[in-house]
Image (cartoon, grey):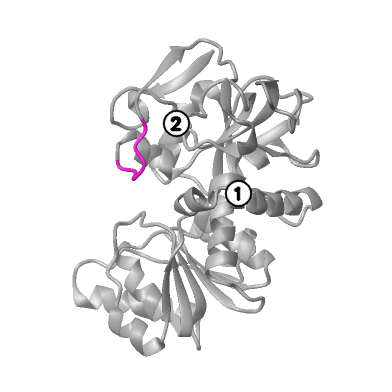
Amino acid sequence: MRALMTVAPGGPEALEWFDLSEPVPGPGEACIAVRAVGLNATDLLMMRDLYQDKVTRPFSPGGEVAGFVESVGDGVTDLVVGDRVVAITGSGGLREKVVLPAASWTRIPEQVSFEEAAVLPIAYASALHALQDRARLVSGERVLVLGAGAGIGLAAVQIAAHLGAEVVAACSTSEKVEAALAGGAASGFVYSPPGSDASGRRELRRVFAEAVGEGGADVVVDPVSGPYAEPAARSMSIGGRYILVGFAAGVGPMPNNVILVKRGEVIGSALGEHLKDRPQHIETLMGQLLDWCAIGTLRPTITSVIPLDEAAAGLELLDRHAITGKVVVQIGEQAGDR
C-alpha cells in the first residue's frame, strides 16, 4: 500500500513515499479504500509540529477522507462492504487504505461525490458549528467573514448565505473576493496589511467599517486574526458576536474597550476540541451538510483535484495561499465509484 508520509518536521518538500503493509481492521473497525482526501491548513501545521495535537512520526497528512468500505472487523454490523463513507481522520489520509473505528464513518448519499464529501468534515463542519452552534446565527443577520476566499472562510460564506444571512466577504485578493461572491456573499472587499504605523491601522479600520456598513456586523467569523482582528471587532454591531475560528495571520490583539462598549461577545469555536467532548456531534453536522449537498442547495467549492502522485504539490499550493476553494487528492479507481 502506497503512503505519502512525513518523517521529520518540514513542509511539502520533506514528504517521502512509503510502501506499507495492507491494514487489517480489528474488532469494531472498518478498512476503507480511499478515493478522495481533502487538504487543509492543519495538515501543514502538523507537518511542521506547529499544531496543538501532536502526531507520532512517521504519519501521512490528510485529515478528512472519503472512500468505500473494503472490509470490516468482528462485531461491526452498521457498515457493509461497498458502503460509501466519509470521516475525519485527523491525519493519515494520504494513503490508499485507512482503518478507523466503524462508528467514525458517515454514509455518503448517492447524489454526493467522493470529492465533495471529502471536503466537508473539517472546513464545512467547522463553519457550520461556528455559525449555528456558537454564533446562533439568525436568518437576516449580517455576517462579516475574514479569509472568505478559501478554506473555512469560503465554507462560512456559503453556509451563512444558505442560512439566510447577508454576507460581507473580506479577502486578501480580488480573485478571492470573486470566489466569495460566487459562493453567496452579498458584497466583498480586499484588505491589505496595515503596516506598523498608526495611519495604516486607521485606514484598515476605515476600510472594514465602510465595507460592513451602518449598524455593523451581527456576527464576525474570523479564521485569520493577526492585525485584522482589531478592525474586524470594531466593525461589530452593538451586541454582536465575534467568532474566532483560527489565527492564520497570527494571534491578534482584541480591543477590550470596543468589546465592552459594544456589549459584544467573543466566542471561540474549535470543532476538533468540541468533538473531544461530544464526538457524536460530528454525525449531526455531517448529516446536515450531506443532506444539503444531496438536494443541491450546497455545493462545496473545489478548485483543484489532483492525483495522489501530486499530493505534495497540492500541499504546496495550500502553503503558498495560491488557491481559492478546496484542494482534493484523488486516490485509486474513480470510474463508477462516484
Which residue extends farthest left? 197
Q: Is residue 154 left or right of residue 233?
A: right
Residue sitting at x 32%, y 73%: 230
Q: Residue, x 61% and y 71% (percent of image)?
A: 186
Residue nearest the viewer, comparing 21 with 40: 21
Q: Is residue 150 visible?
A: no
> Which marked residue is nearer to the observer: mark 1 or mark 2?
1
Q: Which residue is mark 2?
A: 61
Task: Choose between 242 and 23: the one closer to the eye.
Answer: 23
Measure the C-alpha gap from mark 1 to mark 2: 24 Å
Q: Tell me: residue 218, above or below residue 42.
A: below
User: How far from the left and from the top, in percent, is residue 336?
Assistant: 79, 25
Residue sitting at 45 percent across and 30 percent down? Answer: 313
Instruction: State the quadrant of the C terminus.
Output: top right
List x then y, in percent, for residue 267.
Answer: 43, 69
The N terminus lies in which quarter of the figure? top right
Q: Amino acid at mark 2?
A: Pro
Residue range highlighted in magenta: 50-55
Q: Is residue 119 left or right of residue 227?
A: right
